[in-house]
Image (cartoon, rainbow, N blue to C red):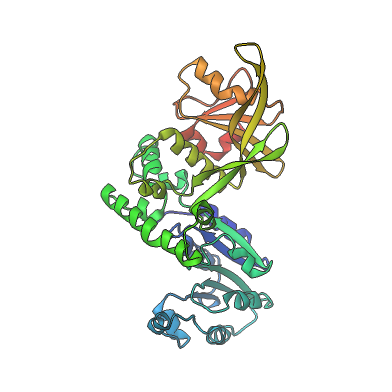
Amino acid sequence: MEIQRNFYLDKLITRKSNGLVKVITGLRRCGKSYLLNTIFYRHLLENGVPKDHIIRFAFDSADDLYLIGENLIELEKKSRKANPEKFMAYVRSIITDSNMYYLLDEVQMLDCFETVLNGYLRKENMDVYVTGSNAKFLSSDIITEFAGRGDEIHMYPLSFSEFMSVYPGDKYEGLSQYMLYGGIPMIVLKDDEADKAAVLNNLFHEIYIRDILKRHKIKKYLDYFEDSFLMEAAQRYDIRGKAYIETPKKYYFSDLGLRNSRINFRQYEQTHMMENVLYNELRMRGYNVDVGVVTITQKDSDGKSVRKQLEVDFVCNAGSNRYYIQSAYSMPNAQKHEQETEPFRKIGDSFKKIVVTKDIIPPHYDEHGIFIINIYDFLLDPSKLEH
């Protein structure tokens, strides 16, 4: 069963022949290699690119290394990388005319790969796409290695709509499974729940932690998790003061299955899980996401003025568009509705304000002009944001 990743395929298509190295980054096992070497490769063929004008090369493939006179076992034994001169000679032998060639590369074991790939940008008939799975490539600073010549396509695990495209049950059961086991494709495609949990535990401890240790030599709290795409941080933003606040950030796991495996599936707080799902969805859609703070002054029980900070879960910006979004697991009565929407009513600007709830209700506006939508509609239909 194949999971379509059209959102990311479209990003690659729009970047074709833009004069930059297209760099696909993201969490290990989120589907980067499959996107490049299967989905995008098939797109090129279906759109008339001759097979002999697509150069696919993986430096962790013994067969591919043999083509350039290198040996995978020897590279591993001697802890060295493949000779770039051998690779460039191989590429030169393939390019026989002035038509466009597409280089789809997994470069984790190529020495000086940044210099090699940047060099191909000087050729008018070379379009370069690259990903990798070594510790350096699984880091947020990889794009800097291309000295301003890289164009990053950051890939996340499956969105909920991608997950539902292959999930056999309904969206209600699907969301519970998605919040528990996450959206890493190889996990989603497994049927047995015990198998899902075992593989997630292995991924976290044997692969992700190993990558961090290999890159940084020692584990250093949240910064390294963020650097390795395991987590993302949202800064706190004073909405009325229009300034960032130097207080602790809020952190969200890029995949909830990995988060849950880390705590042995012991804590399943649906309110927190739902907030994390919404954060990931907004980031996948391309928004910059902050945590909003609204400071108000009100009277206490003694009549004294006191300052109070209200929190808006997400301040979402994309160009000139801004949305304020609150994650509310349930609003069973008017009192809870007032509590969840109070921060919105204190902001005082005209940007759209949205409450996402797990309650099964039709999308509607309340008397304050606040848009209320259930999480299933929000996740499965991005156009609902514009209603």
Q: Position of residue 237 (x, y in %)?
A: 66, 38
In which quarter of the view is residue 213 placed?
Answer: bottom left
Q: Is residue 234 visible?
A: yes
Q: Is residue 133 visible?
A: no
Q: Is residue 291 above or below residue 139?
A: above
Q: Is residue 298 above or below residue 66?
A: above
The N terminus, quarter of image? bottom left
Q: Is residue 145 left or right of residue 29?
A: right
Residue drawn where x is 50% and y is 50% of the image: 231
Residue drawn where x is 68% and y is 35% of the image: 238
Foreground residue among 14 and 134: 134
Residue drawn where x is 51% and y is 55% of the image: 229
Foreground residue among 78 and 163: 78
Q: Position of residue 113 (x, y in %)?
A: 57, 76
Q: Is residue 302 above or below residue 65?
A: above
Residue drawn where x is 50% and y is 64% of the image: 216
Q: Is residue 97 left or right of residue 110?
A: right
Q: Position of residue 176 (x, y in %)?
A: 37, 38
Q: Is residue 110 above or below residue 32?
A: below
Q: Position of residue 124 (x, y in %)?
A: 68, 76
In which quarter of the view is residue 74 placed?
Answer: bottom left
